[in-house]
């Protein structure tokens, strides 16, 4: 995954497997619209935001934003329907294609992608009030934990089906998810599924143990597979409800 040759080959492969973007997908999702972000090195990232369809109805209803980081064979437009769940609860949703994916400029390199998401999260935090939330699945969980490990101030985060380490694939140890769990991880939920054949439970176990020791909530579900690949829609729905209740529940 990392290294001069391997990262270039794997990045090209994953961006190819993600498919072609559907520039019209956002039209079917209430409150959705295209957005762009210009990175420090001048690359334009394309993505979407989903705005709440109405203001908070009660004083206790959560407000704020969630920044979503997807798996490395996914595009932002493929996730809008599912992520609209959070907008219906009063939360602004943001999801971007990684650099080199879809219409986003640049080359898909781990260090650059993590840096991009640091920038985006800081920018959103400066312009939005309310809860500052992060949600990452698979490779996206690695991205989110690295943003957290670099000092991001956040109110809640969900990491779903993320490997403990990427240094085994030639990446710097500093980017290992297990090394980026904060000392107090009480505002983090880690999810793992026993049916996951993409990131197998054994690959996640070290991360789960470290997170649990640092007060994170750890949920291991017998029926869960890889995120957005669960064998039944009801399991996928239950998974999203778990995420929603953690991020948007009282006291977050």
Image: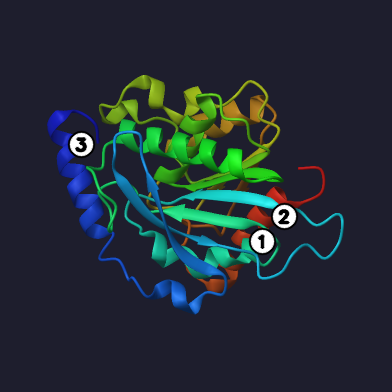
- Relative side of 10 to 196, left or right: left
| Residue 190 seen | no
For the residues labelled 1 and 2, say whether their Cβ atoms are less than 8 Å apart: yes
Q: Residue furthest bottom?
A: 28
How far apart in space, not on screen, are marks 3 and 2 (Cα)?
A: 36 Å
Tell me if I can see residue 84 in this picture. Answer: yes
Label tally: 3
Report x, y in % for residue 242.
67, 56
Secondary structure state at the residue bearing disc 2: helix
* The quarter of the displayed image where residue 210 is located: top right
Looking at the image, residue 121 lies above or below residue 182: below
Q: Which image quadrant is residue 88 in?
A: bottom right
Label 1's element?
helix
Q: In the rendered structure, find residue 241 and report the number of the disc placed on it.
A: 1
Categorize mark 2 by other alpha carbons within 10 Å: few (<14), some (14-19), many (20+): few
Q: Position of residue 183 (x, y in %)?
A: 63, 20
- Name the quarter where the N terminus is drawn: top left
**Image position of 43 (left or right of 141):** left
Q: Residue at x 70, y 63 (%)?
A: 89
**Is there CB contact under 8 Å for labels 3 and 2?**
no
Image: 164 above or below 80: above
Residue positioned 66% across, 34% down in the render: 216
Query: Where does the image place residue 110, in percent across and percent down from the top left?
Result: 31, 35
Res 7 label: 3
């Amino acid at each position: 995954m990392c290294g001069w040759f391997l990262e270039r080959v794997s990045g090209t492969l994953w961006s190819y497997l993600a498919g072609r973007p559907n520039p019209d997908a956002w039209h079917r999702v209430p409150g959705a619209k295209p957005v762009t972000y210009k990175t420090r090195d001048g690359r334009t990232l394309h993505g979407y935001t989903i705005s709440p369809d109405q203001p908070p109805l009660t004083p206790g209803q959560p407000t704020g934003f969630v920044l979503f980081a997807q798996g490395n064979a996914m595009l932002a437009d493929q996730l809008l329907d599912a992520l609209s769940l959070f907008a219906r609860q009063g939360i602004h949703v943001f999801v971007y294609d990684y650099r080199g994916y879809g219409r986003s400029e640049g080359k898909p390199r781990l260090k650059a992608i993590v840096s991009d998401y640091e920038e985006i999260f800081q920018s959103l935090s400066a312009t939005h009030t309310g809860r500052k939330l992060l949600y990452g699945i698979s490779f996206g969980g690695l991205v989110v934990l690295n943003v957290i490990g670099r000092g991001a101030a956040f109110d809640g985060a969900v990491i779903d089906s993320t490997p403990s380490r990427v240094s085994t694939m030639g990446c710097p140890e500093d980017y290992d998810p297990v090394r980026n769990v904060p000392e107090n991880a009480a505002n983090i939920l880690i999810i793992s599924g026993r049916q996951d054949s993409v990131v197998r439970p054994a690959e996640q176990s070290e991360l789960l143990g470290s997170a649990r020791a640092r007060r994170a909530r750890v949920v291991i579900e017998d029926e869960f597979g890889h995120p957005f690949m669960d064998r039944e829609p009801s399991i996928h729905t239950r998974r999203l409800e778990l995420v929603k209740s953690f991020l948007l529940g009282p006291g977050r």
